[in-house]
Image: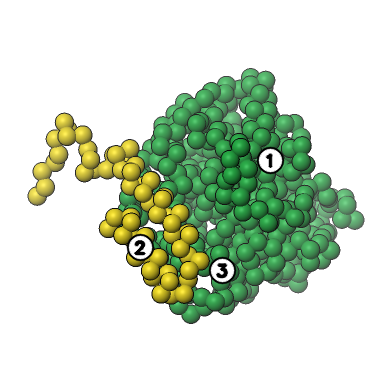
Amino acid sequence: MTQTLPTSLTAAAALLERRQISPVELVRGCLERIEAKNAEANAFITVMADSARADAARAEAEIAHGRYLGPLHGIPVSIKDLIDVAGTPTTAGSAVPARTARHDAPVVANLRRAGAIVVGKTNLHEFAFGTTSDETAFGRIGNPYDPARSAGGSSGGAAVAIVEGMCLGSVGSDTGGSIRIPAAACGIVGLKPTVNELSCDGVVPLSPTLDHVGPMTRTAADAAAMFFAMIQGQNRGTIEPAPAQLRIGVPGPYFLEKLERGVREALARARGALEAARHRVEDVAIALAEHTPDVYLHISLPEAAWYHAPLLAQHAEAYSPGVRLRIEMGRTILAEDYVRAMHARTLLRASVDHALEGFDALLVPALAIPAPRFDERVVQVDGAAEPVRGMMLRLTQLFNITGHPAIALPAGRGEDGLPRGLQLVGHRGATARLLAVAMACEHQIAGGAGSVGGGTG
Amino acid sequence: MDVHRWLASACADADARGLPALKPLLETLARSTEALRRADAAFRHPALADESEPREKQP
């Protein structure tokens, strides 16, 4: 039966609305996949099988009685395990003692209000403080296309859960790229909305002024459905169709440097496909973008140190060594340099605003390299040795600094068989418009192949 | 505090706390801090504003 289950959220929703499939069947299929694959995949930390079955039975009865709520009703979703789900521990992927949530985080409550069914909580890079999902107390998260490689992070389990058909939508968090990086590494869609658009209450912070939550799905339409449910608990948001001819800016030079060959080819292929579809694609510059990593470090590290100081005082030995060192590093940054970075942030925000003038969106790679091997700390890019951590973050973190919405989209696979991902960046406060643009051109960006995330039911 | 003095102080503190593995990370961070400070002019640090533009009088 599970082979026939739909893979995309919106496809499942259409079947649910017509009563051609039941939430009970959908949830059963997802739980069977979790049961079959999670021991190896390490995608889930907590599986909520009993409550999911009960919620599915309730949704089935509601739909049968004509009370269909909309596209999220009866849809199995997962929640990254740094987001509170009432009655479950919020581990943040750490051996540091977890808190047990008394209430759902607002984004979870909104999803439930829209009828979504939580099947479990997904694994992550410890405290979201990394991009490779190997530093976690719950087993490293391998890439579905090559288990010796990372699924990306920090929302690695959320991405794998989508690819493996363990749920139809995942909620992730993104402080420097933690939704978009695993989305690109695993060939799925990941949306970081405009800053502060989705509540981060009930979410273990990494860097409070950079943190975002957002959906991870198979398609842009799926992400839109999740986004509207997460923002207001409603199933039908307002989304104007994108213009027939889009204007897309391709920023350089920072975003075109240090790209692995397959990523560079994916960007060129997408650009060509967009132009062939009669969209206008032009080069554009983002002033000061080359300072992004320095600004990001001096904001994210001290903010993380602030949150973790009391935990470190009690549980320092429970942290993964690498995560602890990064937090300790943040404790040394001078207030003067934090303020300096926050000042730079205002100019970077204006730079991205300026680059977007006259464009519907900017198109940039989401991840400069394919998913790295777990044993790699340095990769060769354009003939130079580059640290993996820097390469993972360099193309996503600017939009956490500036707060612009950005969505990672699958961009086909390279000769190595690994997914590549590009991202579209939209105007601040216009996430719905960005989603419309993504829905209009995800086929061109995918090279005509659609999502490469999965293929398993 | 200049970056060299900050780095020396931070490395001494790392040693004192039994965290020698922190020192290479601090050296990388020091390079980033120097780069950020060098960018003050590019980021229009208010104290480096163009002198041809009159400053507002402080109360």
Amino acid on which the number 2 mark rests in the picture: Ala
Q: Are marks 3 and 2 on the same chain?
A: no
Q: Residues within 10 Å of mark 3 (few under 14, many from 20)?
A: few
Q: Choose between A265 and A4: the one closer to the eye.
A: A265
Chain hosting mark 1: A
Query: What colour denotes chain A?
Result: green
> Which numbered disc, 3 or 2, marks the residue closer to the eye?
2
CA–CA distance in space, label 3 to label 2: 22 Å
Point out residue A1 in the picture as x, y percentages from the top left corner.
90, 56
Q: Secondary structure at mark 1?
A: strand
Identify which residue, A35 or A168, lies in the foreground: A35
The colour scheme applied to this rendered structure is by chain
Residue A150 lies, with reference to residue A221, above or below; the image says: below
* Subunit bearing disc 2: B
- In the image, A275: left or right of B47? right
Q: Amino acid at mark 1?
A: Arg
Colour yellow maps to chain: B
Q: Which residue matches tag 1?
A: A420
Estimate the spatial distance between the alpha carbons at disc 1 and disc 2, rounded to whole Å.
42 Å
Gap in angstroms between the C-alphas marked 3 and 1: 30 Å
Closer to us: mark 1 or mark 2? 2
What residue is at 76 percent from the left and 41 percent from the top? A416
Q: Which mark is residue B8?
A: 2
Q: How many marks?
A: 3
Q: Which residue is mark 3?
A: A321
Picture residue at 61% right of the left edge, 50% below the top: A378
